[in-house]
Image (cartoon, rainbow, N blue to C red):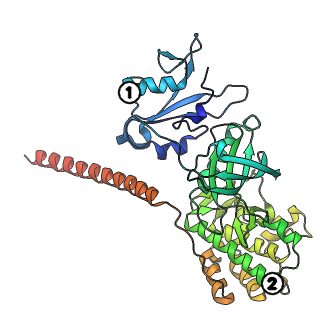
Amino acid sequence: MFDKDIHTEPWYHGLLPREDIKAMLRKTGDFLIRSTEPKQGEARQYVLSAMQNEELEDAGVKHYVMRVNANNQIFLETKGFETITSLVNYYMTTKDPIKKMTVLKTPIVKQDWEIEHSQVELTKKLGEGAFGEVWKGKITMKNGKVEDCAIKTAKLESLNKEQIKEIMREARLMRNLDHPNVVKFFGVGAGQEPLYVIMELADCGALDSYLQKNTNLPPAKKMEMIYQAACGIGYMHEKKLLHRDIAARNCLYGGGQVKIADFGLSREGVSYQMEMSKKVPIRWLAPETLKTGIYSSKTDVYAFGIMSWEIGENGKEPYPDMRVAEVVTQVKNGYRMRFDPILIDFRFGEYVTKHCWAENPDERVPMTDVIRFLQTTFGMKPVIQACPFKEQEMKTMKAISTKRKEKKEKKKKDKNNATTTKTEGDEK
C-alpha cells in the first residue's frame, strides 16, 4: 500500500515533529511528507504538511492525514492513488488545490541534519541508553567525509509518542550548539527504523567512568577538566539553555576535552518550573529546586559545583555517606560538602563554596564569572569556538528575520494610516 522506498524520496522527512516543520515551511506552496508517531496498536500514519498562506506565518501551515479507501488506495479527498509518490506528483503537476485551499508548489527536501540510515555504519555496541542501544560507528557526511560517531538507537515499538517527541526535542536543542566542550551533534535518522540520534564519539566515554579508572590524575589536570566543563555550560547559558542535569555521568571525555552531553532534561529559556512529582537527580540539586522545583542558570551553577567535587574525588558519588532523604534535609538546612585541598586547589574549593553554593541563587555567580576566575587564578586559556552556522544558513535566517520584521512594520504602518484616516473623517 504505502511506498516501500518512501524513505529515499527527498521530500519525505520521517518522524519529523511539528516543531521542526514550522521552520521549514516558509513560503506559500512549500510542502513535505512526514509520518506520525505510532500509537499503541495502530499503524503508522503519513501526513502532508504544507504552507497554505505565508502571510499567516506558522498559522498558515496545514496538515493533511492520508487515508486508505476501499480499493486500498491512498487519498486526501476523493481521488485515490497507488502510492504516496504518485499522489504528490499529481497535486504538484495539476496544481489542484487540496481541500480547495492548498496548492503544492515546492517540495522541501531533507536538511543536512536529517541523516539517511545508509549514511551510518554500526560497528560496535557500546551499551544501553535510556531508550535503546548505543553503538560506535561511522557516518558518511553528504560532502563525502567520513567521521567516527556514536549512535543512539531506539526501536519505535518500544517507545510511546511522548518518548519519541522527547528524543526529537533533545535533537532539536543539540543541533544549534557548536562548542569544543559540548558534544557535537551530527543529526537524526528518522526516515526508517530504528530511530537514530548521531553524535560525535568521545574516545574515553563517560567522564565519571574515566575518572574512576584514572585515579592518579594530577590536580592541574582536574582543574583543566573543571574549566572545560565550565566553558561548555557557560556557552549553553549564552544560548539561553538550561541543562538541568549537570553531572560527571552526563559529560563525555575525548580528545583531551570534557564535553557536556545528555540534554534530555534541558529546556530553552532562563527559568523552568518542574512538577515536584518528577524523578530527579537529588544529589546534584540546589536548595531552591529541592524546595520549590524551580530551575535557573543559577541551579546549573550549583550543580557545576557538585560536579567539580566529583572530578576532584575521582568520580565518587556526592554526599557518599548519606542516603537521598538525608541529602535533601541537610542541603535544605545549609550543609555543603568540603573539597579536599590535596585533590583540588583550595582557592577553587573556597570559591565554589562561597559563590556557587550560596543559599540564595541571586548571590551565586554566573558561569561567565566562574570562567573568568579560572582564567585569572589558574591561567586557563579562552576557548576558541567555531561559528555554529554555515554562511548560507546565516543568510537564510537573516532573510526570514528581515521578512518578519518588514511584515510587522507594514502592519503597524497600515494600522496607523487607518487610524489617521478615521480621525480625519471624524473631523470632517
Residue flagged by tag 2: what amino acid is it?
Pro
User: At 69% from the left edge and 54% from the top edge, which residue is drawn?
Assistant: 264
Residue flagged by tag 1: what amino acid is it?
Met
7 displayed left or right of 253: left
Which image quadrant is residue 100 in? top left
Label 2 element class = helix
Q: Which mark is residue 219?
A: 2
Q: Nearer the viewer, residue 171 or 344?
A: 171
User: At 83% from the left edge and 77% from the top edge, which residue is drawn?
Assistant: 337
Which image quadrant is residue 69 in? top right
Return the x and y of residue 185 as percentages of the image width and height.
63, 56
Examine the rendered structure and indicate whether residue 52 appears above or below residue 244.
Answer: above
User: At 44% from the left edge and 57% from the top edge, which residue is drawn?
Assistant: 392
Return the x and y of residue 108 as percentages of the image width and height.
47, 40
Q: Earlier in the sequence, mark 2 or mark 1?
A: 1
Label 1 element class = loop
Q: Nearer the viewer, residue 158 or 367?
A: 158
Indicate which label's residue lies in the foreground, 2 or 1.
2
Q: Is residue 87 visible?
A: yes
**Given the current orientation, which residue lies at the most extreme top position?**
70
Examine the rendered structure and indicate whether residue 92 appears above or below residue 300.
Answer: above
